[in-house]
Amino acid sequence: MLTLNQIRENAGEVIRRLAIKNFDAKDLVHEILSIDEDRRSTQNKLDGTQSELNNISREIGALLKSNRKEEAEEKKNRTGQLKQDIEKLAASLTESEKGLMNLMVRLPNLPSEFVPEGKGVEGNVVDREGGKIPELASDALPHWDLAKIYDIIDFELGNKLTGAGFPVYKGQGSKLQRALINFFLDENIKAGYLEVMPPLMVNEDSGFGTGQLPDKDGQMYHVTIDNFYLIPTAEVPVTNIYRDVILDAKDFPVKNTAYTPCFRREAGSYGKDVRGLNRLHQFDKVEIVQLQHPDKSYEALDEMVRHVEGIVKKLELPYRIVRLCGGDMSFTSALTFDFEVFAAAQKRWLEVSSVSNFESFQANRLKLRFREEGSKKPQLAHTLNGSSLALPRIVAALLENNQTPDGIRIPEALQPYTGFRLIEKRS
């Protein structure tokens, strides 16, 4: 959430920069400023009325001590009116603050100066590419056919048990999943991230803190009786560990990693983009989260991008790193780099990671602050996160790109985790 000071002091700049995200903020910003002006006026009246009441109360005490009861009684009559005024002003202030909050949460985060302009995916910029796209035989198969032939993923059984988008992994497919999870976690731990294992459901405060609520309410699975939400990513519970926390500047960087299943309704998804593992409602993902000093958050973002790139290289996958334009960015992000790997049988790029800097947007919602040494006043930290990595499309690319007449080859870096070099047909 943007701060009121950002909006008050730079209203024109806020409107201009949000236009890069294709968000017309003009009317909303002006409404926020109008309500804020009324709120501050009400606060001043409330403070003045309370001050008058306090002064009169002291005067009444002095008059009673002097045995001037009639004058004290006249003053008491005035205090009754003042108390009614205070009650009305306090109610009006509460209403203004509630209205102000409802408006402010509708404003997206400001894009950084490094965000290119663009309406959608066509405006994204490829920063760099790596790896080699394999040349497959003419009879090469997409991963959903390979999964059936090798009996490693059963989409029909998942549909029977739950519904579309909930696959069942079997045999070497299950072991490949566990291998990738452990490989990703080990790589993150070696890079200085502390592993945590968070809950898979969160409350409304947690969903609000990282910006999923109210913006993505319809995309989350909601456990209505308890008012909990199944997590769409480990970012939500891990970042919320630090909700309402004040750190010392010397604590930075704070680095966490977590493996969790993730749950997304993906309402409206259909067609070729949802075949096989391309888009699921439940999937596994390993996440990295950093809390950083504002002066170093973009340096940390570069470090996180290089880290994820190193993991993708070890998986021997062709990849590209895409800087998202304003029209393709999330509500909460200030700058996002997407990682895409090439699935050779489908002949298409698949997104497998987003690495983002949220600057102080999430921290303001979370009330996540820090103090500089020798300073009493806390300030907002910066938060960052990234997929490191999401499994389904990684698996899709691994299966498609590494199919051979003898079986599906496992990348060398992954073999110590799988315990096998090839996925073979089950007899």
Image: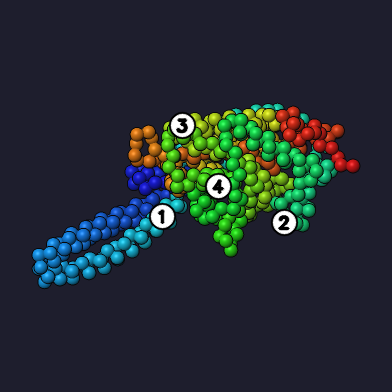
Residue of label 2: 163
Give the mark toward the camera: 4 or 1.
4
Which label was assigned to residue 101?
Answer: 1
> Taking 161 as reference, is 329 above or below it?
above
**What residue is at 36 percent from the left and 61 percent from the top?**
95
Q: Quadrant of residue 91?
A: bottom left
Q: Kindly state the secondary structure of the residue where label 3 is placed.
A: helix
Q: Are marks 4 and 2 in contact (CB under 8 Å)?
A: no
Residue of label 3: 296
| Amino acid type, label 3 | Lys
Instruction: Give the distance between the C-alpha atoms of the residues marked 1 and 3, in whole angstroms.
Output: 29 Å
Residue 281's x, y, as percent? 67, 51
Could you say which is closer to the camera, residue 320 or residue 88? 88
Whichever of callouts 4 and 1 sits on the residue coming sooner in the sequence is: 1
| Amino acid type, label 1 | Met
Instruction: Give the distance between the C-alpha atoms of the residues marked 1 and 2, in whole angstroms.
Output: 38 Å
Whichever of callouts 3 and 4 sits on the residue coming sooner in the sequence is: 4
Residue 378's x, y, as percent? 38, 41
Name the image quarter holding the C terminus.
Answer: top right
Give the mark toward the camera: 1 or 3.
3
Q: Quadrant of residue 42?
A: bottom left
Residue of label 4: 236
- Count of marks, rendered view: 4
Instruction: Give the distance between the C-alpha atoms of the residues marked 4 and 2, in whole angstroms.
Output: 25 Å
**What residue is at 68 percent from the left and 37 percent from the top?**
182
Q: Which color scheme is applied?
A: rainbow
| Amino acid type, label 4 | Val
Instruction: Give the distance between the C-alpha atoms of the residues marked 3 and 4, in whole angstroms.
Output: 22 Å
Give the mark toward the camera: 4 or 2.
4
